[in-house]
Image (tube, grey):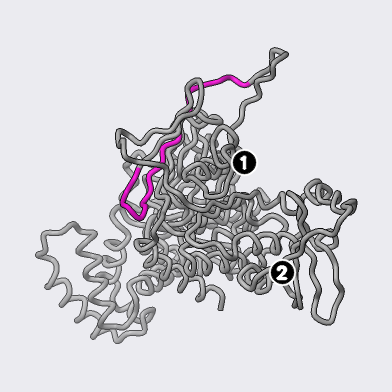
């Protein structure tokens, strides 16, 4: 499966990264396109920049293109004066305000770690933080906005080749230049040539047992893949920067392209940075390679910690017909899974209508609520806090951030950590819960007594002691701690009484509210 292939690639690329001769580690932007102070770190050979429109993704990408001296390029290529131009005409009052700008780079090179700064005052200049012997590192760079590769205006630009008075030069694409496209396109080609004259060039393909045609008659996605394959297939130790990497591509083709880019990075020591609005592209890189950019209330741009899957899917257009429950950790998730398992048939819902996410931490809930408000997603989410948060300030912070009284904030049973509540129920209702866990009641009671005797004198917190007991019971009865929590919660919720009843009632109300809001 392609998911397994991706995981293998991620692991291989992580091992490859320390041995790459060149690696752009970070870029810091100040004073440019509404970005006051932003630092972006690249922690993986293939990284994806994501975020809403106008959060600076392309600005970061174009800034990265200024990091290196590119062999064979002109003096005005890959420099900030060209990539970040101003409108300053000789006549008229309308012009861009000229402000100080700096672009700082940190990278590893064959000679060691290095830093460089592009700075604009009256004009642009480079400096190396006091290192007088330093020069700008040399590296091949490919920069492209992928949507332009299927832009009709660009296609029209090569029509002048129809009027040439002498035949254009021809060169067959190499196997390396064809490989990426051939692996992704449904056709097989007996030959593909590049026809060129001066700065104009045109691709011409002949399908095996099929027609011959120029790129003027290629599908948009076919042309994108051929052009991209031709440009980067042969690169070694390069920096590849692609804006809008999903443009013109079917979701499956997006997935294949990301696989091929990562294979290319692994084989040819290539570093790849792309921008996207596609959840498919995001899923194709590990979480450490996902860089989410957001604009704050004050207008500055910052890097948001990688969203958990439940948030990523909501922000990037997936599963809008789902009620999303956000909790703190694995034990909380398991308790909620148990309650939802009971409610699904009772409320006549599909199981995939409710999705539960965790590992976000209660302290982050307010920032998530603020983002949900921006995306108008508050009604799709339910926040569930651990019982020990009842007396804290988190609830009010979430409500203030959401700026609506309709935000749903619930609590797990008990007034301590969820593991403490689970263990308390196991100790007090052993005979009843033994059936839910498919255990002999006498043996389960004996195992619980032994674990209490072993751990009750420990100096840890109640939560840590309860976690240790659950791990110990897990090894004996051969159920994972999360499975124990889920089964206990399911059995307790069936009683329609006790301290889990408020959570059951509140979840039923949350489902009703969600149904009525859609």
Q: Is residue 411 left or right of residue 505?
A: left
Q: Residues within 10 Å of mark 2 (few under 14, many from 20)?
A: some
Q: Position of residue 242 (x, y in %)?
A: 60, 52
Q: Residue at x 22, y 68 (%)?
A: 468
Asked if the residues shown at circle 2 and circle 1 are in contact, with their CB atoms under 8 angstroms apart, the answer is no
- Residue located at (48% from left, 57% from top): 271
- Is 106 magenta? The answer is yes
Which is more N-terminal, label 1 or label 2? 1
Q: Nearer the viewer, mark 2 or mark 1?
A: 2
The residue to which callout 2 is attached is 172
Question: Residue 246, how many percent across, how many down?
Answer: 65, 57
Q: What is the magenta segment's predominant secondary structure?
A: strand
Answer with left or right where residue 98 lies relative to residue 198. Answer: left
In the rendered view, tell whether residue 134 sits above or below residue 204.
above
The relative height of residue 238 versus residue 66 in the rendered view (above or below) is below
Q: Could one spot residue 514 in this view of the protein?
A: no
Tag shown at residue 53: 1
Marks 2/1: CA distance? Answer: 39 Å
Q: Could you tell me which secondary element the residue under label 2 belongs to? A: strand
Front in this rendered view, residue 74 or 461: 74
Front residue of this view, candidates 33 and 315: 33
Count of labels in the image: 2
Q: Residue at x 69, y 19 (%)?
A: 89
The magenta-colored residue range is 96-114
Q: Is 466 included in the stretch rendered in magenta?
A: no
The relative height of residue 189 versus residue 111 in the rendered view (above or below) is below
Q: Position of residue 225 (x, y in %)?
A: 69, 63
Residue 247 percent across, percent down from the top left: 69, 54
């Amino acid at each position: 499966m392609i998911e397994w292939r991706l995981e293998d690639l991620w692991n291989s690329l992580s091992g490859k990264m320390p041995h790459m001769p060149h690696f752009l580690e970070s870029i810091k932007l100040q004073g440019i396109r509404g970005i006051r102070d932003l630092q972006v770190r690249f922690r993986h050979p293939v990284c994806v920049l994501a975020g809403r429109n106008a959060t600076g993704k392309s600005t970061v990408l174009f800034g990265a293109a200024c990091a290196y001296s590119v062999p064979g390029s002109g003096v005005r290529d890959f420099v900030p004066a060209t990539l970040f131009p101003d409108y300053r005409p000789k006549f008229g009052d309308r012009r861009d305000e000229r402000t100080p700008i700096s672009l700082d780079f940190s990278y590893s090179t064959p000679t060691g770690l290095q830093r460089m700064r592009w700075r604009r005052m009256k004009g642009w200049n480079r400096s190396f933080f006091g290192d007088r012997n330093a020069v700008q590192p040399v590296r091949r760079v490919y920069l492209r906005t992928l949507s332009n590769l299927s832009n009709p205006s660009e296609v029209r630009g090569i029509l002048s080749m129809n009027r040439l008075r002498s035949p254009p030069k021809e060169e067959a694409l190499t196997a390396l230049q064809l490989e990426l496209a051939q692996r992704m396109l449904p056709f097989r080609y007996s030959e593909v040539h590049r026809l060129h004259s001066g700065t104009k060039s045109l691709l011409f393909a002949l399908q095996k047992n099929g027609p011959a045609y120029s790129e003027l008659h290629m599908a948009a996605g076919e042309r994108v893949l051929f052009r991209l394959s031709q440009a980067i297939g042969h690169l070694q130790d390069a920096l590849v920067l692609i804006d809008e990497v999903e443009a013109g591509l079917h979701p499956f083709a997006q997935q294949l392209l990301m696989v091929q880019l990562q294979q290319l990075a692994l084989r040819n020591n290539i570093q790849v940075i792309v921008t996207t609005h596609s959840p498919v592209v995001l899923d194709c890189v590990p979480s450490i390679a996902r860089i989410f950019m957001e604009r704050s209330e004050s207008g500055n741009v910052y890097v948001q910690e990688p969203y958990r899957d439940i948030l990523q899917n909501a922000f990037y257009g997936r599963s809008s017909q789902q009620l999303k429950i956000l909790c703190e950790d694995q034990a909380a998730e398991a308790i909620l899974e148990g309650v939802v398992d009971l409610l699904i048939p009772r409320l006549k819902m599909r199981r995939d209508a409710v999705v539960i996410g965790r590992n976000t931490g209660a302290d982050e809930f307010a920032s998530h609520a603020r983002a949900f408000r921006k995306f108008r997603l508050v009604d799709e989410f339910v926040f569930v806090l651990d019982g020990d948060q009842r007396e804290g300030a988190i609830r009010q912070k979430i409500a203030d951030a959401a700026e609506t009284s309709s935000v749903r904030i619930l609590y797990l049973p008990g007034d301590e950590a969820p593991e403490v509540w689970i263990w308390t129920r196991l100790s007090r209702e052993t005979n009843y819960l033994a059936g839910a866990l498919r255990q002999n009641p006498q043996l389960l009671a004996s195992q619980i007594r032994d674990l209490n005797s072993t751990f009750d004198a420990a100096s840890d917190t109640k939560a840590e002691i309860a976690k240790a007991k659950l791990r110990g019971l897990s090894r004996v009865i051969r159920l994972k701690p999360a499975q124990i929590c889920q089964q206990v919660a399911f059995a307790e919720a069936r009683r329609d009484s006790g301290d889990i009843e408020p959570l059951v009632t509140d979840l039923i109300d949350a489902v009703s509210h969600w149904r009525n809001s859609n």
